[in-house]
Image: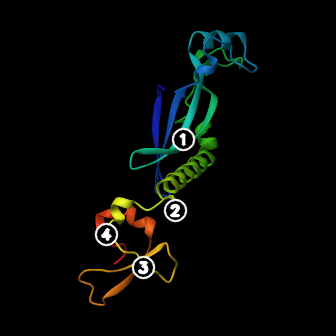
Amino acid sequence: MDIIDSIDLGTVEGFDIRADLVPDTTYYGREPDGDYTPEQIDWFNDGDWYYVGIIVTASRAGTDLGSDSLWAVEAGTMPLDNGESDPCKRLLNIDPLHDEQGTLAAYRADMIDNAVADARLKLTELIDEAIDTSAEPNQEFDAGHDYEPHPQGEDYCYREYEGDNDGDKYCGLPRIAHRFNSATNGKGDQ
């Protein structure tokens, strides 16, 4: 998707937020919808003003995780039917990203909230997929490790750690967590 313009909206709840202005291709080759004068329609057909979409995206560590969008937003230069004889007073320059009273300013807070909520949902889905507690333990990693009964249930491990002054120690991690904890050799939260 071609990006016409982009602005950084800062950080919200740990997510980097940006707004992108993109072409709204729904209107290519069509007349604009709404109450427009013949002169405004001519300017639209000449490409002086056009419709765009605003996409607000929440990302973390450079990965886009959630977004919200608004479409059929006017942008560009449109002639006004205001009776002015001065051509400079008859033109409206529409910049939906940068105008203080533009479209983004009007919907900014809601779009950011929706993008962050979407990003949180995506992160939850990714975590749920990564830690599927119904999955069988990784047999290769579990080889050679004896899991003894643990007070929290059979899915928790209990084993002696080397160098542990107290002897046997409850790990306290679910067995499934050891699959994702190979960097510490499966020793969990020692």
Q: Which residue is mark 2?
A: 133
| Sequence-first tag of 2 and 1 | 1
- In the image, residue 3 lies at what x, y percent? 47, 28
Residue type indicated by callout 1: Val
The residue sitting at 51% across, 58% down in the picture is 132
The kind of secondary structure element at disc 1 is: strand
| Sequence-first tag of 3 and 1 | 1
In this picture, residue 166 sits left or right of residue 133: left
Camera-side mark, 4 or 2: 4
Q: Which residue is mark 4?
A: 144
Badge 2: residue crowd in 10 Å (few <14, some 14–19, many ≥20): some
| Sequence-first tag of 4 and 2 | 2
Instruction: State the residue in front, 187 or 70.
Output: 187
- In the image, residue 25 lies at what x, y percent? 58, 20
Whether the residues at callouts 1 and 4 have beta carbons within 8 Å, the answer is no
Q: Which residue is mark 3?
A: 148
The kind of secondary structure element at disc 4 is: loop
| Inter-mark Cα distance, 2 to 1 | 34 Å
| Inter-mark Cα distance, 3 to 2 | 19 Å
Instruction: State the residue in front, 132 or 25.
Output: 132
The residue sitting at 45% across, 65% down in the picture is 176
Question: Image quarter for residue 183?
Answer: bottom left
Q: Which residue is mark 1?
A: 56
| Inter-mark Cα distance, 4 to 3 | 13 Å
